[in-house]
Amino acid sequence: MVVATFKGPPSECCENKKMERKPSGRRRVFVQTDTGCVLGMELDRCDNAHTVKRKLQVAFNVPTQESSLTCGDMVLKNDLSVVRNDSPLLLTKTFLHRSSSTPCLSPTGRDLQQRDQGGPIEVIGCSDMFAETKQLVKDIMKAIKVGIEPIPIHGGLGGAYFFRNSNGENVAIVKPTDEEPYAPNNPKGFVGKTLGQPGLKRSVRVGETGFREVAAYLLDHDHFANVPCTALVKVRHSIFNVNDRVNGSMHHNKKQISKIASLQQFIPHDFDASDHGTSSFPVAAVHRIGILDVRILNTDRHAGNLLVRKLEGSGRFDQVELFPIDHGLCLPESLEDPYFEWIHWPQASIPFSDDELDYIYNLDPFRDSDMLRMELPMIREACLRVLVLCTIFLKEAAAFGLCLAEIGEMMSREFQGHEEEPSELELICIETKKQLDQEELFSFEAEVVDKDVIQFELDCEYQDLNLNTKVEEKLSVMSPFQVGARNGVVRNTLCKLEESVMEEDETGSEVELPPLGGHEYNGVGNGVLNVSKLSLSVKNTRAGEKGWQPSGIKQKGGFLAGTSSGNTTVNDLPASSSFVKLTDMDEDRWNQFLENFPRLLIPAFFNCRQGNASKKQRQRLGTSCQF
């Protein structure tokens, strides 16, 4: 777990310099093994992946032959010119051999070497948004020098620590990446996986929740939602936990252990949302937090991670301020079922204000993605696609006139019995993918027909036979997506779209869709799909609406099982299904998906508005993971 810093010229240079683009100057990176060991390293121009592995082998006495050096989705084969300064890299093993005869693959605390030449705390990243965090780090370092030690936090499922200033006041919360639930050095007993493997949520990997904490802060432009200052740091202290991988016990050692962690400013508060009635929460505060949660697809917005601070003074009796924290389960790698605590609060049903609509209108998901690629190069492309998709959905829904509660419900899944069904957003994505397949089929058919035009008539007849065979084969492969085939009834992907939309009424006039509220989004959504044709395409297979009321859900103490009660354990968390993946599309197909996606939104929004007029409030089965 110790950070060893190599300075001076490297012992080896790359053998094939022709394959490398030489970066300007030296770069400092932080290489972390899948067991949590961290190595602070100065990269020279001639360093490559092989020399980095050799340095790790020397520092930690571990074999690196069957291993890969990665930066997010990118596997660094040889060339390191794409690695930027302050980038965290991960060394993962291709083949894990765990046995008592090869303990060197899982080093114990006795094998650690104290060779760190860096400071006690280093901020990873150079963004101007980290200026407040850097000042916070200076205050913490002063306190450590005068003997004020951090304090472990005993609640939650992962390792977390209060860091204090010279006055002994809590000023920051530090969460090491290798002490997350399931991570190798988790102090609460939730171990068993290496960094980079699926964690509590299959779409959020072990060791990557800290990156998401920082991403939520960076995406909170102008402190719109009040996310506390957060940064990724390399921090060294003896209080951190290191498990003994040989016998599974906790290793108490007084050596300076260095780790990569998220550091978030501690917000003094009076209570959290679970201890206070929600009626006094300002509408604007709820809206702003909800807007952030929708953008980042927060799967864990429970009452325990909404801090409440009273505002005292003349004319502000019983007024409070809200601070959202714990964003480690946002930006999943695929569309998940979000958990929005605010979804049934009365504030969420109040329309957005003009200021909030302007803020939403000015959001640019592509610019945000580029910013995250620069500030957090280890973040995965799948997470950025989720950000783009959810932001476009939010922008179009707000422009249509939907309120926060309606938007949240369209993103949330239903539970029928013990099974979850895809949300409206997921159904739209499924239908968009289906249309892409159909377009490819038509393009394939047109291409073959055009080619046959130049053939002789006899040859054309022969080609037509082959064409029909190929088309039939492709049609059999690309059958429409069906969900929940139970008791002989099949649910169509867009069965919730009412047939009445855009169809002629009894007088023969056509029903028009509402305008987009005067907002446009870079030309996206200008073309509206003819919903009458879409409705006819699903009319024959429609199985009828299903009720919102879930059946067969056991209740505990008056609460729905799995709701935010603060007592959730790892074993209580249900395995969430993945109905829509965004990474199975290449760049061209993804761009085409984004072009087609908004065309299905308007009829879905119209149906949502029509359905909410008579629909009872749905009950949901949510989960919360406090760590």
Image (cartoon, helix red, strand yellow):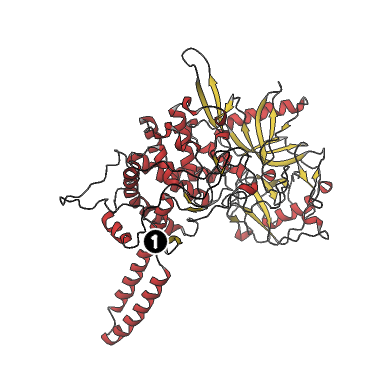
Q: Is residue 457 depicted above or below 77 in this figure?
A: below
Q: Is residue 345 depicted above or below 385 in this figure?
A: above
Q: Is residue 500 left or right of residue 18?
A: left
Q: Is residue 11 visible?
A: no
Q: Residue at x 51, y 55 (%)?
A: 578
**Crowding near the residue tagged with mark 1, few <14, some 14–19, many ≥20 C-alpha atoms within 10 Å:** some
Q: Residue at x 42, y 38 (%)?
A: 405
Q: Position of residue 259 (x, y in %)?
A: 71, 42
Q: Is residue 329 left or right of residue 403?
A: right
Q: Is residue 479 left or right of residue 461?
A: right
Q: Quadrant of the C terminus?
A: top right
Q: Residue at x 59, y 29 (%)?
A: 132
Q: Disc 1 residue type?
A: Lys
Q: Position of residue 51 (x, y in %)?
A: 71, 55
Front one among 410 and 469? 410
Residue that carries the numbered disc 1 in the rendered image: 434
Q: Is residue 495 depicted above or below 189 in this figure?
A: below
Image-quadrant location for residue 494: bottom left
